[in-house]
Amino acid sequence: MSKKVLVTGGAGYIGSHTVVELVKSGYDPVILDDYRNSDPSVLKRITQIIGYEPTHVVCDVCDQNRLEEIFKTYSISGVIHFAAYKAVGESVENPLKYYSNNIAGLVSVLNVLKQNPKVPFVFSSSCTVYGEPMGLKEVDENTAKSIPTSPYGYTKWLGEQIIGDLFISNNRLRMMSLRYFNPIGAHQSALIGELPVGKPNNLLPFITQTAAGIHEKLVIFGKDYPTVDGTCVRDYIHVVDLAEAHVKAIDHLLSLKNGCHEVVNVGTGKGTSVLELVHAFEEENNMKLNYTFGPKRSGDVIEIYANVDYAHSLLGWKATRDINDGVRDAWKWEKSIRNIQ
Ligand SMILES: NC(=O)c1ccc[n+]([C@@H]2O[C@H](COP(=O)([O-])OP(=O)(O)OC[C@H]3O[C@@H](n4cnc5c(N)ncnc54)[C@H](O)[C@@H]3O)[C@@H](O)[C@H]2O)c1
């Protein structure tokens, strides 16, 4: 019988792609979401891709009693915890919203996990925990974490700390924090992708929305940074590669006899500047994008990309898609939701 993996936030951007990849690898995902930042219609779209309606429960992940029931009802064999808020700017304006959902949600899941210590656990962390890496561009898991620049960043920083502390108290638990770099793109079917609520925080949805005519132009923040072309550099990872990394993480944790708290970078290992991403979008999709330069934003890290050696040696995982795949799939997705030919 297929192992059931609880995917909290499974209706969201990364969660929905992970559900698809779990099914492809023979797992039986159970989606837990209350659709506060997603739309239930994603279930129909996932159904179209995987060929059956996935198991789904409407639940606030902070509701520990419900979570305990769900664990029992479905005999959960693994948990991937995506459910959280993710908008850096909003977290500065409303920090308690972020601390209550992101921290309380994690603690709620970990409390249930403590009672089910054989169940592996994967946590959505972020490269924001590195902050501005002092003098480094490429960061590995041993690079010192730095003081986060937002309450959102703190929730990931603290999340890893909470998991580490729990492991010290119970070293039978099998847990992994995946530090995502910058997810982009969409499923090649264009049936699922990123659905930003309001003005997008991330670059590529802003690019695709500008191309779709929703914004007049893209504003690039800063043009004289000490980088290849003066714009900030990030490590853009295709969301399907990222989803595959979660499956590898669950495979790995299930294969272990002993407990662990592993921390693993999930990126491509390659830095791409904002301008390079814009030009890749224009070339791949054969169109011109209206863009301009604006002032630098405070708190923006200048240049960061992942060292991905550990993901490769531990999980046997490597990104296989590049930014051209990402910009092509993101545009295909944007066109499909806007009915653009
Ligand atoms: N997208 C990124 O750029 C990025 C980068 C690094 C880390 N992350 C982390 O990855 C995870 C997933 O991100 P995403 O981009 O898929 O976000 P998303 O907003 O698309 O998905 C999150 C899902 O969780 C659900 N959710 C939130 N709080 C909930 C709660 N209390 N109970 C039940 N459901 C709840 C939302 O409805 C949504 O469907 C988040 O933890 C995020 O912080 C994202």
Image: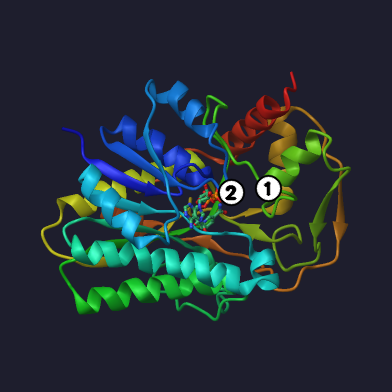
Query: Which residue is at the front of the view, 215 or 75?
Result: 75
Q: How is the image coloured?
A: rainbow
- Residue 98 in view in this figure: yes
Residue 237 point in image, percent of width and height: 52, 47
State the image quarter where residue 223 is shown.
bottom right
- Left or right, residue 80 beside residue 194: left
Q: Determine whether, in the image, residue 158 is placed left or right of residue 248.
A: right
Crowd tier of the residue under label 1, counting other residues whose Cα lies within 10 Å: few below 14, some 14–19, many 20 or above: few
Asked if residue 86 is positioned above or below residue 238 in the image, the reply reads below
Give the answer, above or below, for where 50 lies relative to 296: above
What residue appears at the point 86 percent right and 41 percent down from the top-left corner? 290
- Report whether residue 177 is seen: no
Residue depicted at x 69% and y 55%: 201
- Is disc 2 placed on a helix, strand or loop? loop
Q: Amino acid at mark 1?
A: Val
Mark 1 = which residue? Answer: 197
Q: Which residue does the image show at 71% across and 53% down from the upper left? A: 274
Q: Estimate the spatial distance between the alpha carbons at disc 1 and disc 2, rounded to whole Å.
A: 7 Å
Extreme residue in the left direction: 257
Residue pointed to by mark 2: 37
Give the x, y percent position of residue 167: 24, 73
What residue sits 43% from the left and 50% below the top?
59
Instruction: Determine crowd level at label 2: few under 14, some 14-19, many 20+ residues with C-alpha closer than 10 A.
Output: some
Say which amino acid is labelled 2.
Asn
Q: SS class of the residue under badge 1?
A: loop
Residue 172 at what x, y percent from top left?
15, 67
Quadrant housing the C terminus: top right
